[in-house]
Amino acid sequence: MFTLYFIGLTTGRSSIMSVFPAWAEFLGLVECRIAGIDLPPHAPVEAYREVVDSIKADPRAAGAVVTAHKIDLLNACRDLFDELDHNAQLLGEVSAIGKRNGRLVGMAKDPLTSGLALNAFLPDDHWRRTGAEACILGAGGAAVAVAVHLLAEEHGANRPARIIITDRNAWRLEEVKGMRLGEGIELRHCAMPRENAAAVNHLPSRSLVVNATGLGKDAPGSPLTDEAIFPESGYAWDFNYRGDLLFLTQARAQQVGRRLHVEDGWIYFIHGWAQAIAAIFYIEVPTCGPQFDELCALAAKSR
């Protein structure tokens, strides 16, 4: 029996603990179980190294999916990895840990999975047609991955007119600045929710607002005050699908009046786990079509 580890904060509360057995059977991973490893936010370096060391040494460990600790884990364990993919090096994070012929491989799948999630609800050619902007609240690895996706050369002119990334920690914004992600990004230090609200209040119509802070799941609350006014005919996307989800409550209060599309993190959860599993187990997991629909249906039973 192989084990897929899940490294997070409150793994036992995640839907994946009941979803994975059904997915494993459907995908033919019949000799694999999932096990959660809970670590506190910004855990000691030794804790991260102990976990990664044990996965590397255990021949029955298939790998791991990492959620809240993506950046801290890589900072603590970079020397334990034999290989890092391009996005792991660019973003300084690891969201999936796999093994390749005895070598430990760190992968960052967020640019791919955030793009798949966005494509599920944003209209085709949205940015080029509207001239809208994106405001990403939070500057962690998953947040920056959204910006990387939005700025990808393959999109041509179909990019936001501006991408605002806010964070309450100035040092984190300095780290993002050092990544040199490209033109069109404005980094804004917003120490208080009212400063985030001010950024949102000045967005043009049809713009996108993303809660990438973890507030609403990893900790209670929202990065916005109730004074925030979402963009007319815009999009409010919360990475979270469980927790107090205050950001979603705020957006839904304006959904009719502002003609908002409000999206939680469920489809992001589906794509994130599906593509991590594909990378770790060397299998093809579709991103659309009947097989993907079946994965969604199996997951929905546990939501």
Image (cartoon, grey):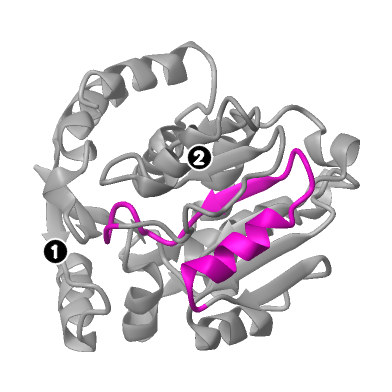
Residue 144 in sight from this viewpoint: no
Q: Which residues make up the magenta segment?
A: 191-220
Residue 7 vs residue 54, the one in the foreground = 7
* Nearer-N-terminus badge (2/1): 1
- Residue 35 lies, in percent from the top left, at 12, 50
Residue 286 in sight from this viewpoint: yes
Q: Amino acid at mark 2?
A: Ala
Left-right relation of 295 to 34: right
**Does 219 lie within the magenta span?**
yes
The quadrant in which the N terminus is found is: top left
Residue 121 vs residue 70, the one in the foreground = 121
In the picture shown, does residue 73 fall above or below 108?
below
Q: Are marks 2 and 1 in contact (CB under 8 Å)?
A: no
Q: Residue furthest front?
A: 227
Residue 191 vs residue 169, the one in the foreground = 191
- Residue name at image x 55 percent, y 30 percent: 255
- Residue 100 lies, in percent from the top left, at 38, 59
Reading the image, the residue beneath label 2 is 251
- Residue name at image x 36 percent, y 21 percent: 295
Disc 2 on helix, strand or loop?
A: helix
- Residue name at image x 43 percent, y 15 percent: 293
Left-right relation of 28 to 3: right
Q: Residues within 10 Å of mark 2 (few under 14, many from 20)?
A: many
Reading the image, the residue beneath label 1 is 58
Q: Nearer the viewer, mark 2 or mark 1?
A: 2
